[in-house]
Image (tube, helix red, strand yellow):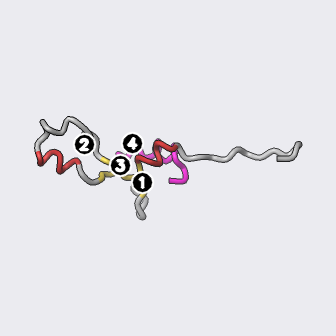
Amino acid sequence: MPKGTSQMPKIRNHRGTKKRFRVTATGKVMRRHAMQSHILQKKSQKRKRLFAGETAVSAADVRKVLRNAPYL
């Protein structure tokens, strides 16, 4: 950048947020369920099955997620 010119710094996504969340076409922020990566032997099949798939982020946390990753 030439001397004397000032520009605003670029806004970047938080990389961890980008990997953990996605936004649907309707604008909902989706996340994975927790508790499905280890110590699975003691969890019932039904419980493990319900952990699969995604769920919407709570309304209280949506703003925090989108602020962390504005281009999500």
The residue tagged 4 is 60
Q: Earlier in the sequence, mark 3 or mark 1?
A: 1
The residue at 24%/42% (across/down) is 36
Per the rendering, the mark at residue 34 is none
Give, as a three-letter code, the residue at label 1: Arg
Q: Are marks 2 and 3 in contact (CB under 8 Å)?
A: no
> CA–CA distance between discs 3 and 1?
7 Å
- Residues drawn in magenta: 57-72
Inter-mark Cα distance, 4 to 3: 14 Å
Q: Secondary structure at mark 4?
A: helix
Q: Main secondary structure of the magenta part?
A: helix
- Secondary structure at numbered mark 2: loop
User: Mark 4 and 2 residues: CB-CB less than 8 Å, in contact?
Assistant: no
Q: Does 44 lie within the magenta span?
A: no
Callout 3, which amino acid? Arg
Q: Could you tell me residue 40's position as x and y percent?
A: 18, 39
Q: Position of residue 42 (x, y in %)?
A: 12, 36
The Cα–Cα distance between marks 1 and 2, rounded to whole angstroms, is: 19 Å
Q: Are marks 3 and 1 in contact (CB under 8 Å)?
A: no
Binning the other alpha carbons within 10 Å of mark 1 as few (below 14), some (14 to 19) or many (20 upward) gives many
Marker disc for residue 31: 3
Residue type at mark 4 is Ala
> Marks 2 and 3, Cα distance to the nearest angstrom?
13 Å
Labelled disc at residue 22:
1
Mark 2 or 3, which is nearer the eye? 2
> Closer to the N terminus: mark 1 or mark 2?
1
Q: Which residue is mark 2?
A: 36
